[in-house]
Amino acid sequence: MKFILIPDSFKGTLSSGEICNIIKEKISVHFPGSEVAAIPVADGGEGSVDAFITAVGGRKKTVTVKNPYFEDMDAYYGMLSDGETAVVEMASCAGLPLVEDRKNPKLTTTYGVGQLILAAAEDGAKKIIIGLGGSCTNDGGCGAAAAVGVKFYNDRAETFIPTGGTLSAISRISMDEINPILQEVEIVTMCDIDNSMYGETGAAYIFGPQKGAGEEMVRELDQGLKSLSAVIESTTGKDVSKIPGSGAAGAMGAGMVAFFHSELQMGIETVLDTVKFDEILSQDSYVITGEGKLDSQSLRGKVVIGIAGRTKKHNVPLIAIVGGAEDGEIARAYEMGVTAVFPINRLPQDFSVSSKFSRENLGYTVDNVLRLLKV
């Protein structure tokens, strides 16, 4: 038999890679000698490079770039086994853990992310996948843009590198000096949220507080993003502010569209395309996926439903093993192509209790699923 394992992580308990290993171990017991393809799912945040390399092969490349406070640090990108696809996770040089007790989204920058993008392009990448997630920034991607040659001017015609607190000072943007090597590169941005660039559902209001912004700073950051949006529109003719996902990662989503001509794509679609998922499906396959909670967010195209769209076309069974599921969502998941859903929790326990037994509960559930398949 052939099994394709492609679960999301169970947030706070088990990583995607750990889930794959638990399922593989059970398969080896019940179906020894079976072909097993393990594809850990990356959501764009920390661990995305490792997940892609595990799925398709490749290696990490280390580069000295700027950290969130413009200090030198070693960060990395992944060059996949085809030698032409690179993966950059912005968290590697603009992630929240890097600032620790220095949280201040008015001062932090995505400059290092732009340096990683350039390094990957200079290394021969023809396609670069950018993972948005876990950022400490709110600069609308201006730092990354400055690193690749975009010029930002204030009202005194002076160039500067904007941060979250100085976006309102941008009076003009020039994209004439962007490094020409990027003209040969396709850039795809993984983005699993649909927040707008600014406003009450925008980057500053929704994500600013976790990055260290109080109420007054949130309003200031939001005004800066609104101002940036207006200058981008006057420069490019595009209103990026309402694009779903433009508010991701401190409005890095908007910056990727405006400055890098990138497409914002659901993370699972990026993963499935990169691993050539449709090509490895076959009629004798069982696909096993899962996530921590199957809810209304899941049905908007995240991991389980994104995979279901592919397996349904090929008439391949899809088994979802989940931490829990909301009322009504399982039935809708079945309509969208999921064959069966199995929650792992065996007893009615609060998450604070059940989370400590996630590994054991997952193992028991997988064991039962495989026993049924044997029959």
Image (cartoon, rainbow, N blue to C red):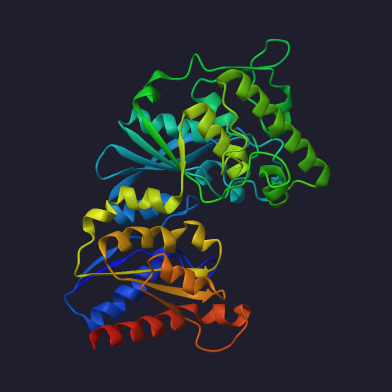
Query: Can see residue 290?
Result: no
Which residue appears farthest toward the front when viewing the image?
Answer: 335
Which residue appears farthest toward the left when viewing the image?
Answer: 33
* Residue 85 as seen in the image, left or right of residue 65: left
* Residue 194 as seen in the image, left or right of residue 362: right
Pinpoint residue 255: horizontal percent, then vertical percent: 56, 32
Residue plotted at (34% across, 75% down) = 23
Position of 289 relative to 79 (above/below): below
Position of 83 relative to 180 (above/below): below
Pinpoint residue 229: horizontal percent, then vertical percent: 65, 29
Q: Quadrant of residue 354?
A: bottom right
Question: In this view of the protein, which residue sits in the foreground, 340 or 68?
Answer: 340
* Residue 89 as seen in the image, left or right of residue 120: right
Residue plotted at (45% across, 65% down) = 15
How many numbered dots are placed on residues in this image?
Answer: 0
Which residue appears farthest toward the right when viewing the image?
Answer: 216
Location of the C terminus by quadrant is: bottom left
Residue plotted at (40% across, 25% down) = 182
Location of the N terminus by quadrant is: bottom left
Position of 110 relative to 175 (above/below): below
Question: In this view of the protein, which residue sits in the foreground, 238 or 345?
Answer: 238
Query: Can see residue 267?
Result: yes
Question: In this view of the protein, which residue sits in the foreground, 60 or 268?
Answer: 268
Q: Quadrant of residue 20?
A: bottom left
Pinpoint residue 52: horizontal percent, then vertical percent: 35, 52
Pinpoint residue 42: horizontal percent, then vertical percent: 43, 55
* Residue 194 as seen in the image, left or right of residue 269: right
Residue plotted at (31% across, 46% down) = 59
